[in-house]
Each structure stands twice: as structure tokens, then as C-alpha cells.
Image (spheres, helix red, strand yellow):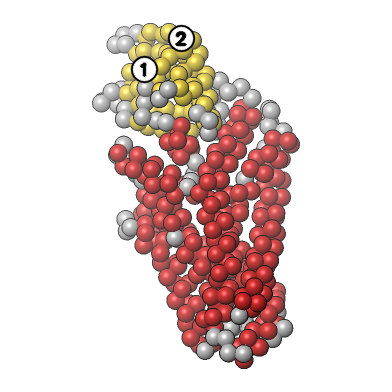
């Protein structure tokens, strides 16, 4: 049984890794072609290549689920074409035993995906996007199209670029009163987080008085705020690029500020259930191999895997926004696609017995 488990593990892991290599590689090539069309100022070919390389961990995380599905279909399909699965069944192995033997090596890919999504993607994406913005702007003191808006109480802020190491470029702040009247504005070329507060550099301030304005320029200015580099790194990233911890922390911060946190809660539950969804994908692949895809060609299996992956992503993309629009809990939107595919796999396995 140990030799059989090792044999199945080697087939499945090699197939999944090959699919991941192909999918992530193609995504990187297409991303590089797209980035080469946006070259400007200091953002040239070398910077575009750096951006694409830093985006590879995100691609690995995003495509891990569908790669597990297609990889298992391809690996088990080879065994089915060689009648090896039939021999295993004739030797007394049940579908459940074969399924468990396939799931165990798949857990390695699941764990790798979790680690990359939790500890690599949030930092690599933040750094890659910030460096691209700074390179494309040419002059970080100018207001560029890219940037990030944030609100804290009655103060609205815009940052041209945010680096993971606690540095800000192009910090614009607008202070309003309770009647939404503008009281003051300021612009700082750069800001650095030092000793629990922000230090602004090359600051230009403008105060709006009743009948006039008053301006001033300072080389440096202390800025006390609840914003920390950790919070800002979460704020600038797309919800799908954040870690589970970051999503939980930032959702709580938004709730404290009275802001809408639904899309961050949706991403939180989606990431939390991703390991379960990947294991369900493995079960779907196993059920298809013992069911309707037992005797078809390899191309048909791969096409079926891509189609099932698209259907799963479509269900996620449909139910996610629906939960925000109609107000039902995001956890339900995240669990429904997994439950549907699990039910589909169980029906096929029962028919195959």
C-alpha cells in the first residue's frame, strides 16, 4: 500500500506542478506583453520585467485551485488510459482509498498555496505596484493618475505611492468640518514612519480663513494618526491580494471608521475556505475520472477541467457581489460554490460504485 501511495503521489504532484508551470508561465508572458505597452518615464523594460516577476506569487496563488483540478484530471487520466485504476480496483482498493491516496499529496500544493497567499503575495504585490507607480510618475511630487484615497474621520488623504517599508510619496491631506466645509489642505513630498508617528518632509500648507487664505512651508512636520504602515499596506491592496490576517484587521478598522467592509469580509471568507475548495476540486477530479471522463481523450479531460474551473470561478464571482447587493452574509456566498461542487462530486462517486 505504501508503494501504491508513493506511485499515486508522484503522478499527481508532477501533473499539478506541470500545469502550474504552464499556466503561471503563460500568465507571466501575457502580463509582460501588457506591461511593455505602458512604458513611460523611468518605467522601462527592466522595471516591467521586475514587476512581472514580483507578480508571479500572486499568479501561483490565484491559479492553484484550477491547476489542482486539471493536474489531477491529467494524472489520473493517464492511469485510467493505462487501465491502472482498473487494476487497483480489481486488487481490492475502493474509490475512497484511492481518493485519499490522491488527496494526501495534493495537500502539499494546498499548504504551499496557503503559505504563499499569506506571507508572500501581500508584500510582493504591494512592493511591485508601488515601484511601478513611482517609476511611471517620473516626479513623485506631481499628482499622478495612480494613487490611493483614504478617509479618517473628517480628514481625506491621497497618497501617490506607498512603500511596504513605511515610506509615503506625495501625501495630500484635506481637512473638513462637520458641515463638510474645507478648512485646510497640505501637501508633503515624502513621509516616513518614525517612532509611532509619521514625519512629513517638504510640506506646503494652506489654511482657509473666513475671507482669506494663509499658506506656509515647512521642511518637516510631525503627523499623528491611527494609520500605520501595516494598515496602509492593507488599504492600498486589492482585497484578493491581502492575507487572511490583513483582511481581518482591516475589516475591523473599517468598521471602527464607519466604512463599508463587505468586500473585505467577502475576501476574508473566500481565502479562509480556499483550502477546502482546493480539496473539493481534487474530489471532483477523482469523481470525474471514475465517472463520465473514464474513457475520453486527454484533451477532453483537460477541456473539462478548464470548464469546471471556469464554472466554479463564475459561481464565486456571481455570488460575491450578490451578497454585497442583497445583504446576505459573505460567508454564505463563499460556501455555496464549494457545497455545490462537493455535492456534484459525491453524486458521481456514488454512481461509480
Rendering coords of residue 37 (x, y %):
70, 40
Q: Distance between the residues labelled 2 and 1?
A: 15 Å
Rendering coords of residue 80 (x, y %):
67, 82
Rendering coords of residue 189 (x, y %):
52, 19
User: Which residue is at the far bottom?
Assistant: 90
At x 62%, y 90%, the residue is: 91
Q: Residues within 10 Å of mark 2 (few under 14, many from 20)?
A: few
Q: Mark 1 points at which residue?
A: 184
Q: Which of disc 1 and disc 2 is earlier in sequence?
A: 1
Q: Which mark is residue 235?
A: none
Q: Is residue 276 left or right of residue 27?
A: left
Q: Which residue is more in the foreground, 35 or 22? A: 22
Q: Which mark is residue 218?
A: 2
- Tags 2 and 1 in contact by the CB under 8 Å rule? no
Question: Could you say which quadrant of the image residue 101 lies in?
Answer: bottom right
| Residue mark closest to the camera, 2 vs 1 | 2
Question: Could you say which quadrant of the image residue 338 lies in?
Answer: bottom left
Q: Is residue 224 placed above or below 43 in the rendered structure?
A: above
Amino acid at each position: 500500500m505504501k508503494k501504491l501511495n508513493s506511485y499515486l503521489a508522484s503522478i499527481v504532484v508532477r501533473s499539478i506542478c506541470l500545469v502550474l508551470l504552464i499556466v503561471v508561465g503563460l500568465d507571466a508572458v501575457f502580463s509582460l506583453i501588457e506591461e511593455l505597452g505602458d512604458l513611460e518615464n523611468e518605467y522601462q523594460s527592466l522595471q516591467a520585467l521586475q514587476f512581472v516577476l514580483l507578480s508571479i506569487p500572486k499568479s501561483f496563488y490565484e491559479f492553484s485551485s484550477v491547476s489542482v483540478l486539471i493536474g489531477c484530471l491529467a494524472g489520473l487520466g493517464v492511469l485510467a488510459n493505462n487501465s491502472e485504476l482498473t487494476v487497483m480496483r480489481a486488487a481490492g482498493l475502493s474509490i475512497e482509498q484511492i481518493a485519499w491516496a490522491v488527496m494526501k499529496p495534493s495537500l502539499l500544493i494546498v499548504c504551499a498555496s496557503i503559505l504563499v497567499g499569506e506571507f508572500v503575495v501581500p508584500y510582493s504585490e504591494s512592493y511591485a505596484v508601488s515601484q511601478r507607480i513611482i517609476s511611471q510618475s517620473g516626479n513623485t511630487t506631481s499628482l499622478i493618475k495612480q494613487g490611493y484615497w483614504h478617509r479618517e474621520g473628517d480628514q481625506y488623504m491621497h497618497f501617490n505611492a506607498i512603500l511596504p517599508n513605511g515610506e509615503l510619496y506625495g501625501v495630500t491631506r484635506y481637512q473638513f468640518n462637520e458641515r463638510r466645509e474645507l478648512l485646510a489642505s497640505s501637501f508633503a513630498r515624502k513621509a516616513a514612519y518614525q517612532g509611532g508617528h509619521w514625519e512629513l518632509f517638504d510640506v506646503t500648507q494652506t489654511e482657509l480663513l473666513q475671507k482669506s487664505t494663509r499658506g506656509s512651508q515647512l521642511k518637516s512636520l510631525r503627523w499623528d494618526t491611527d494609520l500605520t504602515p501595516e494598515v496602509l499596506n492593507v488599504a492600498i491592496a486589492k482585497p484578493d491580494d491581502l492575507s487572511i490576517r490583513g483582511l481581518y484587521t482591516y475589516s475591523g478598522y473599517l468598521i471602527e471608521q464607519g466604512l463599508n467592509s463587505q468586500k473585505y469580509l467577502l475576501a476574508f471568507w473566500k481565502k479562509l475556505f480556499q483550502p477546502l475548495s482546493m480539496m473539493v476540486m481534487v474530489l471532483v477530479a477523482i469523481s470525474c475520472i471514475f465517472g463520465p471522463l473514464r474513457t475520453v481523450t486527454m484533451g477532453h479531460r483537460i477541456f473539462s477541467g478548464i470548464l469546471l474551473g471556469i464554472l466554479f470561478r463564475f459561481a464565486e464571482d456571481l455570488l460575491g457581489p450578490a451578497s454585497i447587493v442583497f445583504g446576505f452574509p459573505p460567508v454564505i456566498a463563499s460556501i455555496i460554490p464549494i457545497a455545490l461542487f462537493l455535492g456534484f462530486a459525491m453524486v458521481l462517486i456514488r454512481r461509480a460504485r
